[in-house]
Amino acid sequence: MNEMNVTEEWRVAVPYKEFGQFKVADIEKIAREIVAERKAAKQSMFITIAALKSDKFKELSSTLRFCADPLTGVMYGIMTGLLPDGNIKWRAVILNEMNAFNLNMLNDAITYAFIRMHPKVVGSPFQMGEAVYRILDEDRIAAQKSAKYVVTGQALQIAKTMKKDLILGFGRYLGMMYPVDASAEIIRASLFEHAATMPYDFMEKFNNPSRKYYEIIKTALVVGIISFDYEKGYKYKSIALGHSESDVLTKLIEDPSLLDSIKAESIKKDPTLKNLQKEVETDIEDIVKADKVKAELEADELNEI
């Protein structure tokens, strides 16, 4: 939950209090959790929130009162009471171009816990349109960079070691389009590029339990076994598969025989796959020849002894 890594799971489970029809996030409890996590991780308690742009002719100033989660309806802000009409009374938080917060101070921690969720802040889960402020937190930035380097290394290793007969389907799942005569080297190079530039997407799709289904769907679309029309959706021959790829996925999971038919026809009609299979066969032949030569050399050495 710490910092801007606010997941949908966290948003659904966020602590809140009810005031009539309103659900108000327990911002103090959230603030205390943030402070506890940062202390446990030995992170700095000092954070700066700065404007993305400055104006040399005037001082930037924004007043933030509250924001609401469109997913859960929970409202985030610093509540000070109820108005006579039953609405929430919020404390105004004024931000200038540079704003320093000491999370050791409960008031600063509460203010920060609210600001980080506001749509005007880069990385807020509710951000819409152009943000105005960003959080300058060196510990968080360093942690994110370290995590990205680790994930990138994992993705590059997978791209390097993935078997030749598997790279085509996975490349298509990643969204790659290949020429008919694409070699294994071209396909693997595209995996390296995706792993280096979009490592999180690479790993998410590699670890997706439904990956094999999506690889079949993407291949069937490329070779024309499955057709798509904006009005009619996805079709296999006369069989309607749905209006989204997730619909197609559900259909194929529910009907294994349909999945097998689409897969078999795609393999027959896929010239790029046939090209790869020839490369794999050549590799096997080369390995067999090399093993044979090695065995003959070893036999000759034994005879000389």
Image (cartoon, helix red, strand yellow):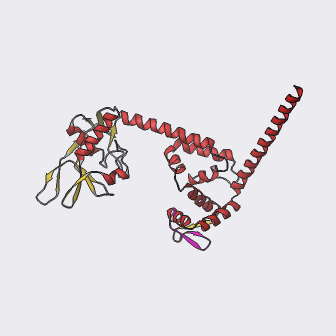
Left or right of 269? Residue 139 is left
Answer with the quarter of the image where residue 212 lies: bottom right
Camera-side residue of 165 and 220: 165
x 71%, y 57%: residue? 271
Residue 291, position as x, y percentages in the image: 79, 39
Seen as rendered, the residue at the extreme right is 304
x 89%, y 26%: residue? 304
- Quadrant housing the N terminus: top left
**As drawn, 142 above or below 25:** above
Residue 194, position as x, y percentages in the image: 55, 45
Seen as rendered, the residue at the extreme top is 305
Q: Which residues are magenta?
A: 230-245
| Residue 232 showing in the rendered view | yes
x 85%, y 29%: residue? 302
Residue 129, position as x, y percentages in the image: 36, 51
Residue 230, position as x, y percentages in the image: 52, 68
